[in-house]
């Protein structure tokens, strides 16, 4: 993943493929994933405006192939205002050996939704 641009209140599914430097899939059986959207890197994860984990917004769709999906639902936007904004995001994995890997980081740009409409 790289920088993301999302419309406020929209539902978005982000595909994740965990690979090594050669591009080969890494088995993520037994791994936990955590996706956060925060104001800046100094913000504690507990204060993230969006915080998702396996079973709560993240689904491992093919562990042996290193595949997962992050689903940002309409309800996940509840602590963000419907106005232009810029946040940072991070995706990390805690593998079955209890090692933590930062899989992706970037900027999340939020564009406002028109009032009275429901984004799709």
Image: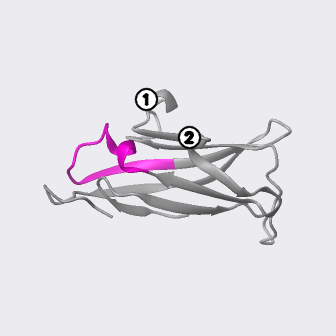
Q: 27 or 87: nearer the eye?
A: 27
- Which mark, residue 63? none
**What kind of colouring is applied to the model shown?**
one colour
Q: Nearer the viewer, mark 1 or mark 2?
A: 2
Residue at 21 percent of width and 58 percent of height:
113
Q: Is residue 84 left or right of residue 97?
A: left
Magenta-colored span: 73-89
Q: CA distance from mark 1 to mark 2?
A: 17 Å
Q: 101 or 33: nearer the eye?
A: 33
> How crowded is the residue under tag 1: few (<14 C-alpha within 10 Å), some, or many (20+)?
few
Q: Is residue 99 left or right of residue 41?
A: right
* Image quarter of residue 18: bottom right
The residue where tag 2 is placed is: 56
Residue at 83 percent of width and 56 percent of height:
27
Q: Position of residue 71 (x, y in %)?
A: 51, 54
Q: Earlier in the sequence, mark 1 or mark 2?
A: 1
Q: Position of residue 90 (x, y in %)?
A: 54, 48
In this view, the residue farthest toward the left is 115
Q: Is residue 57 magenta?
A: no
Residue at 56 percent of width and 63 percent of height:
1
Q: Position of residue 59 (x, y in %)?
A: 63, 51
Q: Is residue 18 left or right of residue 39?
A: right
Q: Position of residue 39 (x, y in %)?
A: 37, 40
* Image quarter of residue 77: top left
The residue where tag 1 is placed is: 47
Give the vertical position of 98 relative to 84 (above or below).
Answer: above
In this view, the residue farthest toward the right is 97
The secondary element bearing badge 1 is classed as helix
Give the vertical position of 52 relative to 27 (above or below).
Answer: above
Image quadrant where one finds the C terminus? bottom left
């Amino acid at each position: 993943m790289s920088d993301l641009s999302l419309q406020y209140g929209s539902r978005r599914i982000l595909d994740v493929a965990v690979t090594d430097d050669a591009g080969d899939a890494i088995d993520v059986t037994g791994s936990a994933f955590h996706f956060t959207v925060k104001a800046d890197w100094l913000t504690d994860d507990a204060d993230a405006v969006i915080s998702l984990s396996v079973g709560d917004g993240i689904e491992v769709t093919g562990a042996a192939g290193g595949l997962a999906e992050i689903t940002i639902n309409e309800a996940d936007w509840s602590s963000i205002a419907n106005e232009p904004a810029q946040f940072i995001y991070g995706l990390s994995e805690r593998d079955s050996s209890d090692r933590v890997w930062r899989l992706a980081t970037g900027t999340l740009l939020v564009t406002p939704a028109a009032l009275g409409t429901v984004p799709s």
